[in-house]
Image (cartoon, helix red, strand yellow):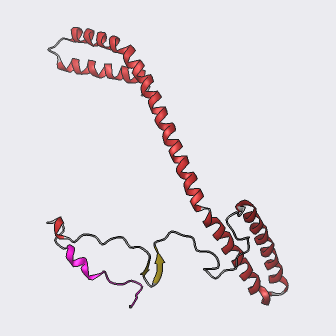
Amino acid sequence: MATATYPPPPPFYRLYKDYLQNPKSAPEPPPPIEGTYVCFGGSYTTDDLLPSLEEQGVRQLYPKGPNVDFKKELRSLNRELQLHILELADVLVERPSQYARRVEEISLIFKNLHHLLNSLRPHQARATLIHILELQIQRRKQALEDIKSLGMWREFLGKEAMWLWGQNWLWFGCANSCRREEAQRLLKESLGTLDGQ
């Protein structure tokens, strides 16, 4: 199979040329891909698993197993990274020709740090989702409280507003529609002011 950086579109795009006139003329979409597939020359999988460092060909600097203390290991790797950066600065000053080994060690530490952080992504996503749901619940409770307090104001002002409306109706008369609209506008403004808008 030949690959290109920017391949042309697949030939079946021609099947959709009459789609705007007749949407049913287009074929059904293909079923979702499961397993591994090749895209732009790279092999990918639909399984959303974080590959281990060994699978990537990188030496693991923190202990293996399911009971990893992430906070402790991240701090340890961070201290080790700081030490290696200081050593790199020292090597660049005293023995500039030997810097490559130090750079490789720093790269290894960074890869381990990134792998640890990426393994925490599901926990981060779960915590973010919980936080978003809690905020939605809090907003909805606040909206209910606002509606309840607004309902009490409307109930209290309902009789007063009807009385005021009747007075304005009698005062301005039926014939003058301009005055009637102005009275309605003033009534709405007064109710809006009392509602806090």
Q: Is residue 100 above or below residue 106?
A: below
Q: Is residue 148 left or right of residue 19?
A: right
What residue lies at 29% left-to-right and 23% top-to-bottom? 185
- Is 169 covered by the magenta stretch? no
The location of residue 121, given as percent across then percent down, is 58, 62
What residue lies at 27% left-to-right and 20% top-to-bottom? 184
Depth check: 97 or 80 in front? 80
Q: How many marks?
A: 0
Depth check: 65 or 60 in front? 65
Q: Is residue 45 above or below residue 166?
A: below
Which quarter of the picture shows residue 195? Answer: top left
Q: Is residue 65 left or right of residue 177?
A: right
What residue lies at 41% left-to-right and 73% top-to-bottom? 34
Residue numbers of the magenta segment: 2-16
Q: Is there any visible trace of residue 20 in the rendered image? A: no
The location of residue 163, given as percent across then percent down, is 30, 9
Which quarter of the picture shows residue 99? Answer: bottom right
Which quarter of the picture shows residue 110? Answer: bottom right
Q: Is residue 180 above or below residue 13?
A: above
Main secondary structure along the magenta-highlighted residues: loop
What residue lies at 35% left-to-right and 23% top-to-bottom? 189
The location of residue 67, given as percent across then percent down, is 70, 63
Q: Quadrant of the C terminus?
A: top left
Q: Quadrant of the N terminus?
A: bottom left
Q: Is residue 66 left or right of residue 138?
A: right
Q: Is there any visible trace of residue 155 in the rendered image? A: yes
The location of residue 63, given as percent across then percent down, is 73, 70
- Is 7 covered by the magenta stretch? yes
The residue lying furthest to the right in this view is: 94
